[in-house]
Amino acid sequence: MNDKVTLMKGNEALAVAAIRYGADGYFGYPITPQSEVLEKLEEEMPWETTGMVVLQAESEVAAINMVYAGASCGKTVLTSTSSPGFSLMQEGMSYMAASEVPALVINVMRGGPGLGTIHPSQADYFQAVKGGGHGDYRLITLAPASVQEMVDFVALGWDLAFKYRAVSMILADGVIGQMMEKVVLPEQRPRHTEEWIRENCPWAVNGRKGMRPKNIITSLELDDDKMEENNHRFQATYREIEKNEQRCELINTDDCDYLIVAFGSMARISQKAMELAAEEGIKVGIARPITLWPFPVDAIRKAAEGVKGILSVELSAGQLIEDIKLATECKYPVDIFYRLGGNVPAPDEILNALKEKLVNKLG
């Protein structure tokens, strides 16, 4: 590991991490608040050092289909976007899920619906963790809460994508994408060789000029029985991911009366609210889902044991809270505090909501 500490913006750190991981290609389109990903890649010019392709596509639709093509060849490819662009990519991600190809998609969320605002949001939660495109599919969804995690989750996302032949997503809100923090970057990895791809991706399209490809990648299946068989295989993979890849950070949950569940920037702000609560003698713990899908059901359920109530803190109008209720089987009072339209709450707002909605009612 390169121990040099660098001050970087979240989006920029993510771009450098992609180069350091040994990415083969990035295909994207500018949109605030994630445009720095493409800008940093262009500044670093990795095509001159590692051979990585960096291409600004004509649209998000074009970008996701370029990723689809590269992933079909076993290449390590990614794209990044923000909420309206993520909507345009849904069809392509559904195709990739059906084709079982690994890829990394980054969504730095902004407020909506519609064009909305360029300020932070977490309102793409449903679209990401429930599979926003058509059909029964899932995206492995990682939620960073720091610039360091923006770096670390690039490697984790691709490793999981290749392990399960699935699409991985880094779902960050605009706060994490735009904030600057100290970060330690990984050592440069070599790009995967053709030999590595042949050994680890035997399904990949690997034809050469003048030759028919060994494999054909497609999401189309006209035989209903075969399509049902394919879907059962997809679901079996998703159950395996749910079993093996749940991740959650628990803070002060061993002895707390109230539990806050939040991810991304809201988890960080909630930690300060937890400290303010402690000054008033209110014992609060925090559960921060790191994987939004698979949702860390086991950790949330354990953290909730014995609490008086649970508060979902989010930058969306009640999306995270649904999975909290499912995870805890509605055994505890669960309420919500949220801000919308790109507004980010202060810690004292979260504490006041906790007291108003739970502490004053439950004691």
Image: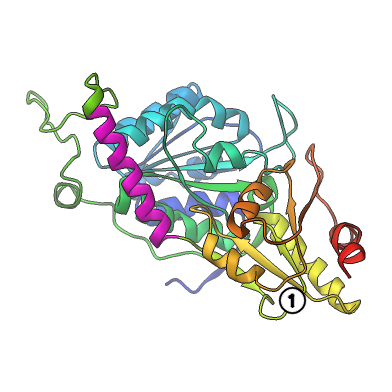
Q: Is residue 276 magenta?
A: no
Q: In this rendering, does residue 101 appear at all?
A: no
Q: Is residue 184 left or right of residue 75?
A: right
Q: Residue furthest left?
A: 211
Position of 91 relative to 333 (above/below): above
> Where residue 356 appears, x then y in whole percent?
91, 58
Q: Residue 305: x and y, percent?
A: 65, 72
Q: Quadrant of residue 5?
A: bottom right
Give residue 227's quadrant in the image. Answer: top left
Pick whichever, 325 or 77, lies toward us: 325
**Residue 272 appears in view:** yes
Magenta-tinted stretch: 226-245
Query: At x 37% / y 34%, what residue is drawn?
Result: 67
Q: Which residue is mark 1?
A: 256
Seen in the picture, residue 115 relative to 34 is either above or below; the reply is above
Horizontal relation, residue 48 to residue 359: left or right = left
Position of 16 with respect to 324 (left or right) is: left
At numbered mark 1, what does the secondary structure look like: helix, strand or loop? loop
Residue at image coords 41%, 30%: 94
Q: Which of 173/113 is in front?
A: 113
Quarter that holds the N terminus? bottom left
Q: Which sits in the foreground, 17 or 258?
A: 258
Q: Position of residue 30 (x, y in %)?
A: 57, 31
Give the quadrant of the C terminus: bottom right
Q: Amino acid at mark 1?
A: Cys
The secondary structure that most of the magenta stretch takes on is helix
